[in-house]
Structures are given as C-alpha cells and as structure tokens.
Image (spheres, rainbow, N blue to C red):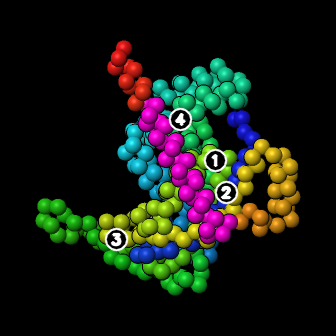
Amino acid sequence: MFDIFKNRLEITGKLSTVTALRISAGRSTEPIGADLPVIKDSLEQPLIPGSSFKGALRSRLESFLRGIDISLAEDPASFTSPTRNQIIKKLKEDYQDDAILTDKLLNQTDLISRLFGSPWIASKFQVQDLTVVVDTFGQYQERDGVAIDRDTETAAEGKLYDFQVVPSGTNFKLKIVVENAETWELGLLMIGLHQFESEQIPLGGGRSRGLGVVSLKIDQMQWFETEGDSRKLLTYLQNQVMKNMNDYQYCEEEMEILKQDWTEALILHLRNFISSNSTISANTEQI
C-alpha cells in the first residue's frame, strides 16, 4: 500500500477497575483452582489483552456511526463474503499503482474500518496489552456461578461452577499508538476514549451482573505532525533516538484543545457525509 509517514500520536494512561473484572482464559484443566480463571501474564499477574480493549472500543463506535447512517460501519461478517472478496481481488488485479489502488480500496471501506482496519486495509492504531500496576493488585477473588433451569427456575443439575475475577481498585497501564490518521479519525478515537473515561464501556464477561465497569484516565499525549516539512521529520527522528521528546508532550490544557479540534473535525466530516447523501437521494428521486 502507498504510505508516507505523516503523523504519530502516543497516548498513555491508566485503566482502573470500578467493579470486579472477569476476562476469562477459558475453562481450566487444573485439578485445583477456579473453573474459569482470568487471563494472566508469565508472572501470573492479571492482563487485559489489547484486542479486548480495542474490540470494545470499536463496537461502541460502530453503534454510534450506525445510528447516523448504517453504511458508516459495516457488519464485519460482510468483509469475507464471496462478493466482497471478488471485488477486492479484481481491484488488485486492475490497479497496479499503489496510490490509485489505495484510493479504490478506500472507496470500498466503511468509516470505522479506515481507523480500525479490515482484511484489505491495516489498522492505523495499536493497543498494547494492558499490564497491571503491581502496587494496586492484591489477590484474585473467586465467585460462584450457576446455570438456571428456565422450566423449574432453579439451579440446573451439574451446572454449578466458580470463576475468578480481578478485584475493583486494580489499575492497568494503557498505551495506544496511532500513525498516519486523518484529523477526523483522531476525533473518532477521542469520542471512543471518552466513553471509557466516563465508565460507559464495560470489559470482559459477567457484565449483566455488574462486572467489568472500568474508568480511563489519560496521563499523557505525545503528538507529532510533519506538515509536509522534511526538516521537521528529521529533527523528530533525531529526538527519538536521543530520547528528547519533551517538545512533543502536551499538558492537560493542550490535550483538551487537541481533543476539541479533532472532535470538531469528525463532526464536520459526518455532517458533510450526511449532506452529500441527502443531495444524492434528492437527485435520485427527481430522476
């Protein structure tokens, strides 16, 4: 794919469990311990996979975009349909120039996938696995679970189990890296992260029981944009090697300004999309 480095955003923060968290590693085969343990790292400390955080974020943003227009966030199941595969294959055969091919592929890509990726376009951002802040973690808790027989409204025979949870008050380190994002795409990300900041996106299993409520606190944002200036990029690369990145760190007040600018860019982009679709619909009706 045709690609030129344009910008990079690095976000670090802390994700705190407001209620107990259960991200299961599957049924255990150990003779002793919980039937459903949580995911752990090599040191037996709790771990939140970056894919779990990213998946929950994408799901929430998809619901918002579909509320505006269903075409803004396609069903991922359609990505592997035979018809879609044939279209993508033909585009790759017909267009050998990377820049032209990229433009054609983007026309086949819904808004959410431009940021999160699809089978034919790479994601523009990554979320590292969230590791625990050791000082905030005490020990795992075990809770009982049972399947209910709908007919008798009692516990189903042989369906009693126990599961492991990470207690509330546990903190995890979050790091997100975004490269070559459009301004409106950064706005989309800011809206999604705000959902975590306001405790509106739960993680893991047992959410109907109140598990998985988390709260995000962004500690630092590091932002660089080349603005087409090769000298700025050279200086940035040199500063990276010398670990002199203070010029690219934004204080809390500056972060709020960036968030506002990016969010406004997203709203404008969506308003233009709605206006364009309305015009096309009106012209179609006249014909």
Q: Nearer the viewer, residue 122 or 282?
A: 282
Residue 165: percent from left, percent from top = 43, 75
Q: Secondary structure at mark 3?
A: loop
Q: Residue at the far top: name it.
A: 287
Say if 42 sits above or below 276 in the image: below
Q: CA distance from mark 4 to mark 1?
A: 15 Å
At 66% across and 69% down in the image, what residue appears? 251
Disc 1 residue type (three-letter): Ala
Residue 236: percent from left, percent from top = 81, 56
Name the disc covering residue 9, or none: 2
Disc 3 residue type (three-letter): Gly
- Which residue matches tag 1? 181
Disc 4 residue type (three-letter): Thr
Q: Secondary structure at mark 2?
A: strand
- Which residue matches tag 3? 210
At 50% across and 74% down in the image, what residue appears? 16
Q: Which segment did they paint magenta?
A: 250-277
- The reply to whether callout 3 and callout 2 are in contact (CB within 8 Å) is no
Quadrant of the rendering where the N terminus is positioned: top right
Q: CA distance from mark 1 to mark 2?
A: 9 Å
Residue depth check, mark 2 versus mark 4: number of the one nearer the observer? 2
Residue depth check, mark 4 versus mark 1: number of the one nearer the observer? 1
